[in-house]
Image (tube, rainbow, N blue to C red):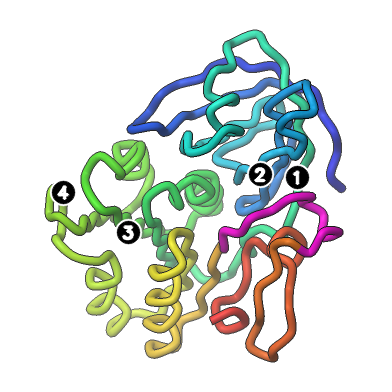
Amino acid sequence: MPKKISMEIIEQENVGSNVYRLTLAGKFSAQPGQFVQVAVSTAYDPFLKRPFSVHDCSANTLTLLYRRSGRGTSLLAEKKAGEKLEVVGPLGTGFPMVTEDKIILVAGGIGSAPLFYLLKTLQAAGKKVAFYYGARSKNELILREQYQMLADEYMEATDDGSCGHQGVVTELMADVLDEEKPVIFACGPDGMLRAVAKLAKRNKCRCYVSLEAHMACGVGACLGCVVPNIRGEYVRVCVEGPVFPAVEVF
């Protein structure tokens, strides 16, 4: 059940171009893929809390990875160690734990955020994990060294060729999926997720995607984040998701 928690900032790091890693202290637990809502101001402007995926967590800490892109995240980026934030969570449906031993994680840009905690959890469960990371350029491969250190296999792709394979990240996966049938977990831009889902379906691989959406309430009441599923129904990203079987939403 989600809870409202007052958490203290331990550290706020600038880890990339307008990308920050925020570590908070307080009792917290979540599944990989779930998210929280954070009050970025104690005033009524902005009124709504901002959603952030759980980048990492332990019994006494919560870590968020986010891009400074608007007024809310700009206010959050100005927060200092020792300040307190109101956090609501955990929210949403996370990544399922699977029995298969071979796993592929696919990240696109800042979509790597929830996959760090998932990668750590899978490794602790004894899974063999390959991490495929794609972005427009090298400076958008955030915390790449940490993913590389944790994963059993690590591959990169950039649109401009500044790091790794020049092209889209799914081009790196095609040959691997011809030989094996791993479970795929992905988070990133919608176009990348569609390509991953198509590749997984063609190769008869189970695939789960974490969707991004404009969330207001975070608990399914406002219906501001709905997306259509394969049956033509509308599902709430904040409640039924953000993680869905790829065949349900693509």
Note whether 78 is above or below 170 in the view shown.
Answer: above
Real-space Cα separation, disc 3 to disc 1, in angstroms: 27 Å
Instruction: Give above or below for 204 relative to 38.
Output: below
Near mark 2 (Cα within 10 A), the count class, few <14, some 14-19 or many ≥20, is many
Distance between mark 3 and mark 2 Cα atoms? 25 Å
Q: Residue at x 25, y 39 (%)?
A: 139
> Sequence order check: which comes first, mark 1 or mark 4?
1
User: Which residue is at a point 87% across and 48% down the rendered structure image?
Assistant: 1
Secondary structure mainly formed by the magenta segment: loop
Whichever of labels 3 and 2 marks the residue nearer the N terminus, that label is 2
Task: Give percent across and percent down for residue 181.
Answer: 40, 80
Residue at image coords 82%, 28%: 5
**What amino acid is labelled 4 in the image?**
Cys
Q: Which residue is mark 1?
A: 90
On residue 163, which mark appears?
4
**Residue with the mark numbered 2:** 51
> Magenta part of the protein: which range?
211-223
Q: Secondary structure at mark 1?
A: strand
Q: Amino acid at mark 1?
A: Pro
The label number, if any, that marks residue 132 in the structure image: 3
Judged by depth in the image, the label closer to the viewer, 2 or 1, is 2
